[in-house]
Image (spheres, rainbow, N blue to C red):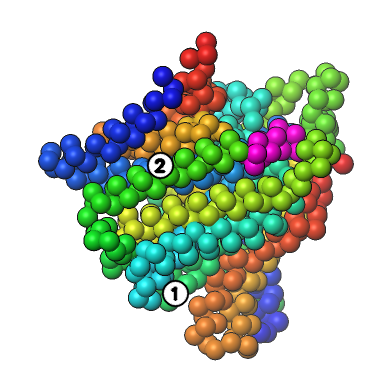
Amino acid sequence: MSGILLLEQSLNGLQFGLMLFLLAAGLTLVFGIMDMINLAHGSLYMVGAFLAATFVDLTGSFWLAVALALAGTALVGMALEVSVLRRLYARDHLSQVLATFALILVANETVRIVWGPQLPLAAPPALAGPVEIVPGLQYSSYRLVIIAVGLAVAAALYFAIARTRVGMLVRAGASNREMAVAMGVNIKRLFTIVFGCAAALCAVAGAMLGPILAVQVGMGENILILAFVVIVIGGIGSIRGALVGALLVGVVDTMGRAFLPHLLRQFLRADLAGALGPALASILIYVLMAAILFWKPQGLFPARG
Amino acid sequence: MRRWLPFAVLAAAAAFPLVARPLGWDFYIGFASRIMIYALAASSLNLVLGYGGMVSFGHAAFVGAGAYTVAVLMAEGVASAWVAWPLAVALAGALAAAIGAVCLRTRGVYFIMITLAFAQMIYYIAVGMRAYGGEEGLNLPTRSQLGFGLDLKDDVTFYYLVLAILAAALYALRRTVGARFGRVIEAIRENETRMDAIGFPTYRYKLVCFALGGALAGLAGALLANQNSYVNPNLLYWTQSGTLMIMVILGGVGYLYGGVLGAVALLVLEEVVSGYTIHWQLGVGAVMLAIVLFAPRGLAGLAQGRRDG
């Protein structure tokens, strides 16, 4: 296991973790402020990716397409909030699970009818090749851009939450919703805005990850569970927790996949290690989550103290 | 009216193959068996979720554990139902007890997520069992052997066995929730702090309830493996847990027949809509959404609400 390989896998982990953060940040805000379990969050990620692929076709520019997909998904998200989700805030978690599970089915089929089961989405040609970041390590330039975009969005999000008026209202809503309402916050409008922002973050993640993973129906379900793991590890409602949780999950998952089979081979027979390694690597983040909940049942950074 | 309705349904279910077989509706006999197996699985979740108030999002793991027990034993040459099925129940129950012991330390949303996490671990273990099919799954060469001259490969025999098991399980559930244990479980759901203060060992009661639910799900899994003659890791994927939960919520959380009603409603709806269009998920999703928005207490609640009103 060389230092170069370690660096490469760390970067992969960072890149995946930052994209997870974009999903988890929206999810944790919706969860924390509105006390709403939104299983359809992954569907917005899917819609974002499909919109991006369509706009790349229409405009020919990757970055313009990302911007358009972001706006489009935000609109879809806000429309969804106003038409359906708004009626669910007062209901119990079970109803929310049922309703948003239904929304997943509806979204998957609608996407299938409009676009078909999958769309091609390629990274912009300028970023197709690798670059040498340290001697001996050729690293995909597109993944570097993903890291940069992730860091930029995380910084912008931090600024928006910590320094702006809307961010203040969001924090107030997350820590004590009733009190925020009592102090005269227009919670209805705030919810719609937050939901639109969450949808936009989904679209960024969907569009950026599209060229690496695949743009297909059902892409949201796999990553949704990871995003839930992230926000539970970080503490529901906490943006800082989401960032730490996302990086933790991204790095642990990537490292586990890269090194665990290799590590097991030191102790076990090769065929056994080959069979066990990938399964153990997939389990690793769930073990991490169970362990964290065992010792810190409220997650690492509880938003409600 | 309410007293005889379950018996009327039971009688109708018992008569169904007598009508269906001469008419050549063999497909529907298998379909009805599948519905009843899912009804059993959903009812086991209803015990945990509806009566115990524990929102478990990992119930498919226990169904899958039961199914895999039967399939793996059969691959190793043990086809007897008398060995495999009790073992499936015991294994799923023990798994539920172990997972429950950890999960029940958490509350609310965290409980939902940690049960999900454990179910995903079991899912990946199933994916990792390359000797038993891994991601591809495992075909069962035959159905379990019951003896007594009963051949489960015959769909009608299998149908009657599933019906008998479902009826027995529902009767047992009814006795359980009506007994002191059930009352305590429901009281814990309503106010755990108070029950704790009165002196009930709430954690132990909840754990027993969770393990019972898991064991019953294991039985459903054993039947499901036989029904499909095939197991694969998708049986344990989180969307399966979601589907079971949907059945319970759809039927009516905490109503004895909630799980049954939900399984019948969801599977029949899927079957009917998929007959009209390949985009059946759109219709099913829309109907589910309408039920949440307009019938908050599920189908059983809808029927009861009308009677009370």
Q: Which element type, helix, strand or loop, lies under badge 1?
A: helix
Mark 1, chain letter?
Answer: B
Mark 2 vs mark 1, CA separation in Å = 37 Å
Q: Looking at the picture, how far across and down is residue A99, in whole percent?
A: 53, 32
What residue range appears in magenta?
A: B180-193
Q: Residue at x 66, y 84 (%)?
A: A1
* Left/right of residue B135 with respect to residue B96 in the rendered view: left
Q: Looking at the picture, how far across and down is residue A63, in whole percent?
A: 57, 47
* Left/right of residue A166 with respect to residue B86 in the rendered view: right
Q: Marks 1 and 2: in contact by CB < 8 Å?
A: no
Residue at the disc numbered 1: B130
Residue at the disc numbered 2: B167
Q: Which element type, helix, strand or loop, lies under badge 2?
A: helix
* Left/right of residue A249 with respect to residue A210 in the rendered view: right
Amino acid type of the residue that numbered disc 1 sits on in the rendered structure: Arg
* Left/right of residue A186 with respect to residue B287 in the rendered view: right
Tell me if mark 2 has few (under 14), some (14-19) or many (20+) residues whose alpha carbon lies within 10 angstroms of its own: some
Q: Looking at the picture, how far across and down is residue A245, in whole percent?
A: 73, 55
